Image (tube, rainbow, N blue to C red):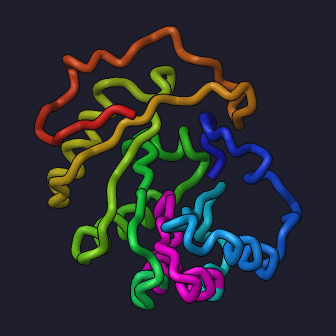
Amino acid sequence: MRCDYCYNKEIVFAKNGNYTLSDVINFLKTRVGLLDGVVLSGGEATDHDLVSLCKEIKNLGFKIKLDTNGTNFQTLQTLCNFELIDYIALDYKAPRYKFGQITKSSKFEEFCKTLDYLLASSIKFEVRTTVHTDLLDEKDINFIITDLLIRGYDHKYYLQNFLDTEENIGDLKTSLKKLDRSLLSNDLEIVFR
């Protein structure tokens, strides 16, 4: 994906990494007893072979949280089947009718497959949406809430404000428009971050 508001531009467009699997594990060994868990994030973490990495992390005694856009269902399912993930933060990027525009991807169905899988599982997870009001408005958020409810999601729904780091894929600046919270559905508990 190439979400306009993504602030990890350097990671998304990186050609090479600076660290090997053994570098990461050796670093984590120095944190045993100091940290409880590790967050796998990105870009999109599931674009990589995470099974061996997660096994190594679990062997050190850490819990693992995965931040994902949900478009690599097979990888996510494999990680869950091996019980390598303790918690998932699933990014609901946009409603179907804006998904391609915002993400530059056509993988909405793959995202839905992941969401439905998580809903049918016992895996702890949350759904969250990053909001830049030039891209998403109250109607879009309400559409997402309705879709979540229809699918059976009844947990907290997290809305996080776009973070203007001056380095994002779409060269976006903070929007002058504010989200009118009074226009948002109260059918799900919304938590603002």
Q: Which segment is the magenta one?
A: 53-78
Q: Which residue is drawn at 51% across and 9% down?
A: 176
Side of 72 relative to 16 (left or right): left
Q: Residue furthest top?
A: 176
| Residue in view at x 49 percent, y 65 percent | 66
Q: In which quarter of the image is residue 22?
A: bottom right
**Residue 97 higher or lower than 136, as above or below:** below
Q: Is residue 189 left or right of residue 55?
A: left
Q: Position of residue 84 (x, y in %)?
A: 47, 82
Magenta highlight on residue 74: yes
Number of disc labels: 0
Which of these two is toward me, 138 or 160? Answer: 160
Magenta-colored stretch includes residue 102: no
Quarter of the picture holding the C terminus: top left
Question: Can you give x and y, in whole percent of width and height, for residue 60 in the image?
Answer: 58, 83
x and y, in percent, of residue 185 in the image:
16, 31
Is 148 situated left or right of 104 in this image? left
On the rendered structure, is 164 left or right of 24?
left
State the residue lying farthest toward the front.
33
Determine whether 52 is above or below 75 in the image: below
Position of residue 122 relative to residue 111, above or below, is below
Kindly identify the residue that appears in the image at 24 percent across and 34 percent down: 142
Q: How far across and how far down the image is residue 30, in percent?
A: 70, 72
Q: Nearer the viewer, residue 20 or 80?
A: 20
Residue sitting at x 23%, y 42%: 145
